[in-house]
Image (tube, rainbow, N blue to C red):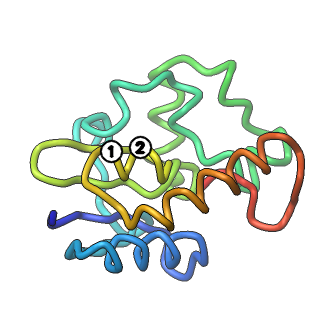
């Protein structure tokens, strides 16, 4: 099993479930606040650089949901400045096991990477597919 650094939004129900899945799979966690971390451009880019700029953003953040911030239209420097100024905009969780980092919690990808309980991963995958097909609202927003 892996030791996982897990950056969360404290009090987030989705992050609480994700942490529990990791613990149930036998991983140990070093839980940190995404909002309290003193982010620098280099530290944040260690997670985000491999992704498209639009994928850096938490689509459930109030300023994104309202349309005030449109991630699809931002360049890298503007996006990074926004995320550093307002960490609530950062897609979560940020995960690190060893030297590898991940953004967001896709159960199938996490299962393939470090392992999750297979039944949990299957249920989560089915739920995600249902959300993508428009079959539910409660909790279907991306983490």
| Whether residue 25 is situated above or below residue 76 in the rendered picture | below
Say left or right for 77 vs 61.
Answer: left
The spot of residue 39 in percent (x, y) is 31, 52
* Residue that appears at 25% across and 53% down: 114
Mark linked to residue 47:
none
Mark linked to residue 109:
2
* Residue that appears at 85% across and 47% down: 66
Element at label 2: helix
Quadrant where the C terminus sits is bottom right
Farthest residue, direction left: 98
Say left or right for 68 vs 43.
Answer: right
Q: Are marks 2 and 1 in contact (CB under 8 Å)?
A: yes
- Res 95 visible: yes
The spot of residue 4 in percent (x, y) is 22, 64
Residue that badge 1 annotates: 112
Instruction: Mark 1: give few (<14), some (14-19) or many (20+) Cα within 10 Å.
Output: few
Task: Examine the image and state in which quarter residue 38 appears.
Answer: bottom left
* Residue that appears at 73% across and 37% down: 69
Instruction: Mark 2: give few (<14), some (14-19) or many (20+) Cα within 10 Å.
Output: some
Say left or right for 6 vs 91.
Answer: left
- Res 105 visible: no
Q: Nearer the viewer, residue 121 or 84?
A: 121
Say left or right for 103 vs 75.
Answer: left
| Whether residue 80 is situated above or below residue 58 in the rendered picture | above
The spot of residue 14 in percent (x, y) is 59, 70
Task: Examine the image and state in which quarter residue 124 appears.
Answer: bottom right
Element at label 1: helix
Quadrant where the N terminus sits is bottom left
The spot of residue 133 in percent (x, y) is 84, 40
Distance between mark 2 and mark 1 Cα atoms: 5 Å
């Amino acid at each position: 099993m892996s030791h996982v650094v897990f950056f969360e939004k404290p009090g987030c129900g989705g992050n609480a479930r994700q942490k529990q899945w990791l613990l149930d799979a036998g991983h140990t966690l070093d839980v940190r606040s995404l909002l309290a971390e003193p982010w620098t451009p280099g530290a944040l880019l260690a997670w985000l650089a491999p992704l498209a700029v639009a994928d850096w953003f938490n689509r459930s953040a109030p300023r994104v949901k309202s349309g005030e911030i449109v991630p699809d239209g931002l360049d890298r420097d503007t996006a990074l400045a926004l995320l550093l100024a307002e960490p609530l905009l950062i897609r979560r969780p940020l995960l690190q096991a060893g030297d590898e980092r991940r953004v967001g919690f896709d159960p199938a990808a996490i299962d393939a990477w470090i392992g999750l309980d297979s039944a949990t991963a299957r249920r989560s995958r089915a739920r995600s597919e249902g959300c993508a097909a428009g079959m539910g609202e409660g909790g279907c927003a991306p983490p």
